Image (cartoon, rainbow, N blue to C red):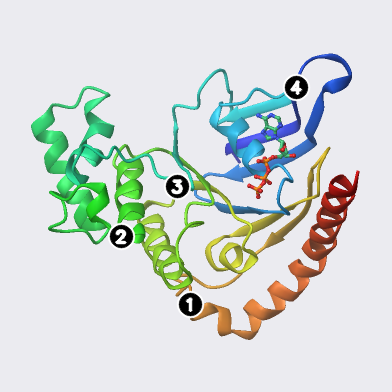
Amino acid sequence: MQHAVRLDNVDISFGATGKSVFRAVAGANLSVAKGEFVAIVGPTGSGKSTLLNAAAGLLKPSAGTVEIQGQPLDGLNGRAGYLFQADALMPWKTSRDNVAIALEISGTPRREALERAENWLEKVGLKGFGHRYPHMLSGGQRKRVAMAQVLIRDPEILLMDEPFGPLDAQTRLIMGDLLLDLWQQDRKAVMFVTHDLEEAIALADRVVIMSTGPDAKLIGDFTIPLARPRDVSEIKLSPEFQELHRDIWHLLKEQVLKAYGNQNREERA
Ligand SMILES: Nc1ncnc2c1ncn2[C@@H]1O[C@H](COP(=O)(O)OP(=O)(O)OP(=O)(O)O)[C@@H](O)[C@H]1O
């Protein structure tokens, strides 16, 4: 099987050479198949974003390899679209222009870019909002524009880092449903970082668990056999969901407690 993303024995270190090197991730292995939705969960500071940044080509591993669609990654990952916690909307541009610019920068004529931007705004539930500037939108609406901005380029891989982090609980559920709706139309490979285990189980085909750093690695890999299409808020009530949550939390809790222990020791030192 060809993988969309494959991290093989990856180490990622920060800092200067010599003794001050901080090895955040050590010996991490992770494969994401084409069309697969993988969520990465772990305690704060475990290295989830670091791993995602390696798949995006924003960070170069100090050891190991990153392959994208079977090819070693060299430089930025041009096949991926990246959605961060903070959106990248330009305050001086309307929603329509914010989405269209994603096409215009790669040479699409403005008229066509604007037309396709309108279509995408409709797909994310923002028909009629194209003329609004980011400050005239709610947090959830801004997130919809940011999603359209990424998806309009039709990337083969989606890298998402706590994309719904700043939203309130109800809006997170609605955005989860929207993401699954759009994902189901063409099933891109997804790496989705979250600290929210419920969100991970509700959305993903697989949930992988990172251990507490330094030298964090992937220590758990759970298949989520819940039927699709899923309703993100309803699915949490099902006994299958609760059983999966219990099993995964058992492993994750240990790492979370370890992370808090480390933090308290650092604060006392
Ligand atoms: N540029 C950097 N320079 C030095 N250390 C860094 C850098 N980026 C991340 N780190 C460290 O690497 C470790 C992993 O960070 P990372 O942001 O990947 O964790 P995370 O699991 O995404 O955390 P959170 O859930 O809190 O966002 C942390 O200890 C962090 O302090």
Residue 194 appears at what percent x and percent y? 60, 55
Residue that carries the numbered disc 1 in the rendered image: 233
Q: Quadrant of the N terminus?
A: top right
Q: Residue at x 21, y 52 (%)?
A: 121
Which amino acid is tagged 2?
A: Ser
Which residue lies under the disc numbered 2? 138
Measured from the top left, where is residue 58 in percent x and y? 56, 26
Provide the residue designation for mark 4: 15
What distance separates the C-alpha of mark 1 from that of mark 4?
A: 42 Å
Q: Are marks 3 and 1 in contact (CB under 8 Å)?
A: no
Q: Is mark 3 within 8 Å of ligand 1?
A: no
Cα distance, mark 3 to mark 4? 34 Å
Instruction: Find the distance from the CA under tag 4 to the CA under tag 2.
Output: 38 Å
Sequence-wise first label, 3 or 4: 4
Can see residue 214? yes
In the picture of the structure, the residue carrying the numbered disc 3 is: 188
> Is disc 1 placed on a helix, strand or loop?
loop
Gap in angstroms between the C-alphas marked 3 and 2:
27 Å
**What residue do we see at 45% from left, 75% from top?**
231
* Mark 4 Cβ and ligand 1 under 8 Å apart: yes
Q: CA distance from mark 3 to mark 1?
A: 23 Å
Dot 3: few (<14), some (14–19), or many (≥20) neighbours within 10 Å? Answer: many
Q: Gap between marks 2 and 1, in whole Å?
A: 21 Å
